[in-house]
Image (spheres, helix red, strand yellow):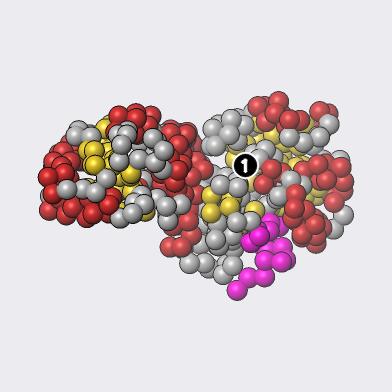
Amino acid sequence: MRDFTKPLRVTDDVYWVGVNDRRKVRFENMWPIPEGISYNAYVIEADDGFIAVDGVEEEYSDEYLSKLTEVVGDLSRIRLIVVNHLEPDHQGTLEELVRRTRAPVAISGIGAKMINDFYDVPRDRLRPVSDGEVVEVGNKRLRFIFTPWLHWPETMMTLDETDGVLFTCDAFGSYRALSEGLFDDEAPLDEYVREAKRYYVNIVGKYAKNTLDAVRKLRPLMSSVKVVAPAHGILYRSNPLLPLDLNEEWALPRLEREVTILYISMYGHTVKALERLKEGLRSRGLNVKALDAAEVHTSYIMSEANNSAGVIFMFPTYDASIPMPLFEVLYTFQVKLFGRGRPAGVVTSYGWGPIAKIAAEQVQRSGFKVVEPLVTLRTRPRPEELEKMEELASSMAKAVDEVMASQRTA
């Protein structure tokens, strides 16, 4: 077990000086993190000083500065501050570091334009870098690699060519605080990969094209990379290519012959229809997941449904609209462009005001293609209404098979 209250060595001259956050209930105040999250910051020792790479949330500045000081001694020995990404969970300590050192701040050009919207950093301290530029600090060579919209416009990565460490900031990150170990070969990798997928679809997934562009840009450089060091979660040294491969897979997911049903049932009537629909889908050879949107947070729903070839939404009418938990899911799907052209079914029930067309419009706005028929049930489903589940199952199976055939020929 590692002691994460102390600086940890990444390579001979690179140190982890990050922190674990086990206080926060939701990352970005939206995404559940029951196992916490880490903010990974780093410092590189050169022959004539130090390079600080990113920081942590302001709430943890004392712990960060204590670790940093333990490595560098006097903070005035820091010769360069690298800002890969401006988000406050990485730069909450930036102002203090600027105040206590004379080091210039290496940042992308767009980042230099944005920085004073977030932090008070004197303009004469900024050192804008260009894509692919190499900066030497003592005996260390740093290459800056622009990765725009991964997931902000100013994001970049820093490759320490001397030590073989790629600092990727939010890219390739993961939920889950560091506990068992710092590296992939010290920690429960399956658990971090599971949380890395959820992190990806929640935080970065909207920018799938940018993810793929970044991975393609990085691959020619990876032969010299010994460690991939993101800003959240474990570091990858036993297989530095793994985070690239995984993010590429999640950005361009291989769809499975599977349907995820997202439902809400207030009094059990929707569940009766759900069971009939599941039977119909399974009888046609489809794998089926059913997630209660009132019990499963959107964050986990996105991860579970990312590889499903089809999705079905089932819910009762509530105040002439969609019940709030499922409305939140649909809104998040719209923001994150989650549908990706996949087929989706819609099943609604009502007492006096049907909303099937309204529901279908919301599903379409999420990027799905709505499959006919739109099924409307009159509160408690009658036997003849349950037959509609068979019709929808048949249509969905056909639509899924078309998606799978298209994927095979792509």
Q: Is residue 371 left or right of residue 384?
A: right
Q: Position of residue 374 (x, y in %)?
A: 23, 34
Residue farthest bottom in this picture: 1
Residue range highlighted in magenta = 1-23
- Mark 1: which amino acid? Thr
Q: Position of residue 172 (x, y in %)?
A: 51, 48
| Residue drawn at (87%, 42%) of the image | 99
Q: Position of residue 379 (x, y in %)?
A: 27, 45
Front position in the image: 167 or 116: 116
The answer to whether 274 is drawn above or below residue 396 in the figure is: below
Magenta-highlighted stretch: main secondary structure? loop
Quarter occupied by residue 397: top left
Q: Which residue is mark 1?
A: 158
303 in the magenta segment: no
* Quarter of the image where the C terminus is located: top left
Front position in the image: 255 or 239: 255
Quarter occupied by residue 131: top right
Q: Is residue 315 left or right of residue 185?
A: left
SS for dot 1: strand
Front position in the image: 32 or 62: 32
Q: Position of residue 38 (x, y in %)?
A: 62, 57
